[in-house]
């Protein structure tokens, strides 16, 4: 599959994020795609992303939900505006609020699947709900309130 | 200061966490201490822990709040039981729920200070509230519901 991910459209100054920036060589470099009205991101944890042995640490789960949700917010806003992600002005979202419920321990050897839906999109704000699954079981649920990056924050 | 941190008391199988395990050489290795009835953790982000340039990515903030809060939950439970952290049985908490409100962008060059208080502690559960500050300004607020690791999860 050679489809571009949401994050592949981020202009350079927005592509440095540790979680989702394709230009951050130390980072997670997550990739998010549409799958109908849901967005999906698959991520394989490294063995050192551990909590207690055998399970993924909560901060990684929070990071995946966070960055996949802000990416989904941007992609959804392009859709909402009826334009492609390679058109200007570029859209990038930051997290105003993040909530993660950890339902069960997440096995570290699984490819994790984060699926998100847009619950609300209005003005400069989007509310994104998500699940994180391993081997088909939902291990965590997320909710992110994302807001468009204000122009004064872009250096 | 040669005082031992909460995380320095974790037995080996609990000291692997990417966020707070002293034995995870890839991880953040955060250190938490009592400061009266509050607990405190100071963490200096790396330049690559960026979101948009100049600011810390939300996943790191979530990770610091998460691990500092579970560490605080354990330390608080020892206090609650009237015993030292080097006594058995060892206590270790996992996160059931994490909420982070990002109040303002967090500058990446600052030493971040996470301060936590125990809101509730009962049975195997603790509720921990926290703030994350940079240069004296509160940049994020956290709330974590932490539960004691069930014995069947310890390998």
Image (cartoon, coloured by chain):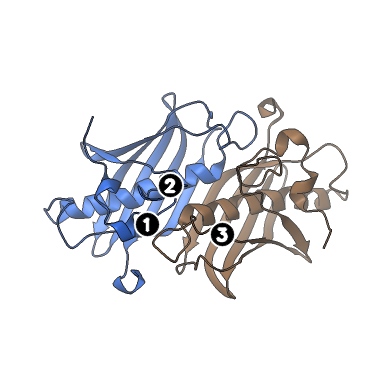
Chain colours: A blue, B brown
- Residue A142: in sight, yes or no? no
The disc at residue B38 is none
- Above or below A42: residue B49: below
Q: CA distance from mark 3 to mark 2?
A: 16 Å
Mark nearer the viewer, 1 or 2: 2
Q: Residue B38 location in percent, x, y?
A: 72, 64
Query: Circle 3 is placed at which residue position?
Result: B45
Mark nearer the viewer, 3 or 1: 3
The crowd level at tag 2 (other Cα within 10 Å; few <14, some 14-19, many 20+) is: few
Q: CA distance from mark 1 to mark 2?
A: 27 Å
Q: Could you tell me which chain the residue with mark 3 belongs to?
A: B
Q: Could you tell me which chain the residue with mark 2 belongs to?
A: A
Q: Residue furthest left?
A: A82
Residue B111 placement: quadrant = bottom right
The disc at residue A145 is 1
Residue A125 placement: quadrant = bottom left
Query: Circle 2 is placed at which residue position?
Result: A25
- Asked if labels 1 and 2 share a chain, the reply is yes
- In terms of secondary structure, where does tag 2 sit? loop
Mark nearer the viewer, 3 or 2: 2
């Amino acid at each position: 599959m050679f489809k571009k991910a949401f994050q592949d459209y981020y202009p350079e100054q927005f592509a440095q994020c540790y979680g989702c920036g394709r230009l951050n060589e130390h980072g997670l470099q997550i990739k998010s795609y549409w799958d109908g009205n849901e967005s999906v991101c698959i991520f394989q944890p490294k063995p050192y992303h551990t909590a207690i042995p055998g399970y993924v640490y909560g901060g990684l789960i929070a990071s995946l939900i966070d960055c996949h949700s802000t990416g989904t917010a941007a992609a959804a806003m392009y859709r909402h505006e009826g334009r492609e992600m390679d058109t200007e002005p570029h859209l990038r979202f930051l997290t105003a609020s993040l909530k993660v419920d950890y339902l069960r321990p997440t096995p570290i050897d699984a490819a994790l699947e984060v699926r998100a839906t847009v619950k609300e999109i209005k003005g400069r704000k989007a509310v994104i709900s998500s699940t994180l699954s391993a081997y088909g079981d939902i291990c965590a649920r997320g909710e992110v309130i994302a807001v468009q990056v204000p122009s004064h924050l872009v250096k």
